[in-house]
Image (spheres, helix red, strand yellow):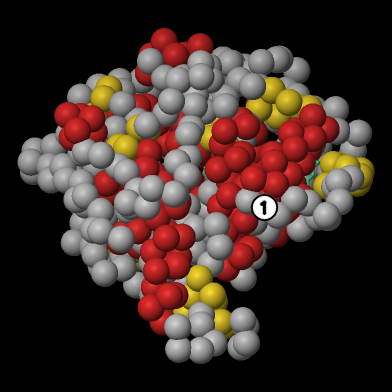
Amino acid sequence: MSAPPVLSPFATSALIDIPFKMSSPAAPAIRTVDKEGKEITTVGFQRFGFDCEVPLDVVRALYLRPHYVITAPTSNDATELDTREDEQHARFTQGLSAYQSKSIFHPETQSISYTTLSRFPPVKLLPPSNRKRVLVTGGAGFVGSHLVDRLMLLGHEVTVIDNFFTGSKTSVSHWVGHPNFELVRHDVVEPFMIECDQIYHLACPASPPHYQFNAVKTVKTSFMGTLNMLGLAKRTRARFLISSTSEVYGDPEVHPQHEDYWGHVNPIGPRACYDEGKRVAETLTYGFHRQDGVDVRVARIFNTYGPRMNPYDGRVVSNFIVQALRGEDITVYGDGKQTRSFQYIHDLVDGLIALMNSGETRPVNIGNGDEFTILEFAELVRDIVARVQTEDGEPPKRRVQIIHGPMPTDDPQKRRPDTTRAKKELDWQPRWTVAMGLEEMVRYYKAKMAEGSL
Ligand code: NAD
Ligand code: UDP
């Protein structure tokens, strides 16, 4: 395989001119289309003087590994292995495999050897006046790691602080050692000193089993963590964005939920540590804004899914995909008539960056309005998993059944964002269909399974 084209910088003209082609003519291209059927070739956009546009292939090469892990040879066929490795990487990374680590699975010993990158993905070379020093708390988590990828590719200096409660070092390990990147193990309930221009405060477990695992710690993280990060923003005059949640609306009596709705939250139920934690975090944020003039942004994020989501975090998307891939029954809680609206990770990252760089200080819903009952969603996941498996020449051995389990306490019955404000003030709206994002996520988990890490 010939060397991939080097992409630097990511100027818009470069996006058009640089051919992101695989060298292997036999390798299939992944065609990704948006809600209007137009091909998606980039993520992000230029808005509020902040360019966050990156070729989709470049972002994708950071998380979408080959379908099948490379299995170490039992004999002396190393050359054949190298060729196979390169071909397999080329299939998914479209020639960008030089920027991926390759995990090699040894079936005899059930072990895996990790390699490191020989070079980092090219990042934009920004003039110092445009380069931001960005702190991402919870940057080793699902949302954080995708935000970090984007900010790094765009050429900013990124510091991640994370206590690795639900996040993992491996989600950002491809940047460790890069001159623009720093990873610090730190718990946000303790103060943190750094000089920075922007703070994305994401640190907080997000899945119900995780945030209920230690409810007191979740409240501490939400309150003390936010207090510490707001204090940091006050001292450094950094702009502060908090990832709040649709859970501040609780089990809503208004549908869809708009930002002026005050919510319907049980303050003492099992979800309260998270819901009330985020509500008080918003209260603190506006306290610092009014009293101390801290420049704040509040993103109310609705259910988001995508690669790098912890497959065992108990959230519905990861649960359903993993169950279907394993050929196990899909467990719908309750009758499955409760609804959720699912947003793909790249749309969320676009929305967060747009909000951070906009002038909007009021809360902004960021979510996808495509609403499903959980039962419909289970059927969709089952169909997509079966299609991907069939396309890969491994059709499912049996049709996965949908079974029902007990309904969790205080599970919201309806959820769909009203994103009028985001559209008007940020000129942002989701581009990814739920099915398109699910397909990519299925391929990601499938590769993880083949690798033996799931
Ligand atoms: P996640 O659990 O994958 O990531 C959270 C990260 O925060 C992890 O890396 C975790 O280790 C870290 N963390 C937790 N407590 C910490 C502490 N005390 N100190 C330092 N680090 C800590 O969850 P996610 O889905 O990536 O969510 C990120 C943020 O977005 C959270 O604030 C969450 O409330 C918010 N959010 C997410 C969704 C969603 O659907 N993913 C929806 C609404 C809001
Ligand atoms: N759910 C389900 N089966 C699962 C996991 C979740 O039916 O294996 C349901 C859950 O009861 C809720 C919805 O899916 O109604 C979304 O749950 P999730 O934990 O992903 O997030 P929530 O939106 O409730 O915070």
**Residue 4's x, y, as percent?**
25, 53
Q: Say whether residue 309 is left or right of residue 60.
A: right
In x, y percent, where is residue 380? Answer: 74, 34
Q: Secondary structure at mark 1?
A: loop
Q: Is residue 12 visible?
A: yes
Give neighbour class at mark 1: few <14, some 14-19, many 20+ (Cα, 10 Å).
Answer: few
Q: Quadrant of residue 38?
A: top left
Q: How many marks?
A: 1
Pinpoint residue 315: horizontal percent, then vertical percent: 69, 47
The quadrant of the picture occupied by the C terminus is: bottom right
Q: Is residue 209 visible?
A: no
Of the residues shown, which amino acid type is indicated by label 1? Gly
What residue is drawn where x is 20% and y is 24%? 49
Say which residue label 1 marks.
Answer: 393
Apparent side of residue 248 relative to residue 414 in the rendered image (left or right)? left
The answer to which image quadrant residue 165 occupies is bottom right
Q: Please state which of residues 442 and 134 is positioned toward the viewer in this rendering.
A: 442
Q: Is residue 285 above or below residue 122?
A: above
> Relative to 253, does residue 173 appear above or below in the rendering?
below
Corner quadrant of residue 76: bottom left
Q: Is residue 421 above or below residue 135?
A: above
Horizontal and vertical percent for residue 191? 37, 58
Q: Please state which of residues 68 and 242 is positioned toward the viewer in this rendering.
A: 68
Q: Left of 285 or right of it: where is 440?
A: right
Q: Going 16% across and 42% down the picture, which residue do you hit? A: 9
Give whichever of 118, 226 is nearer the camera.
118
Residue lying at 49% horizontally and 63% vertically, measured from the top left: 168
Q: Is mark 1 within 8 Å of ligand 2?
A: no
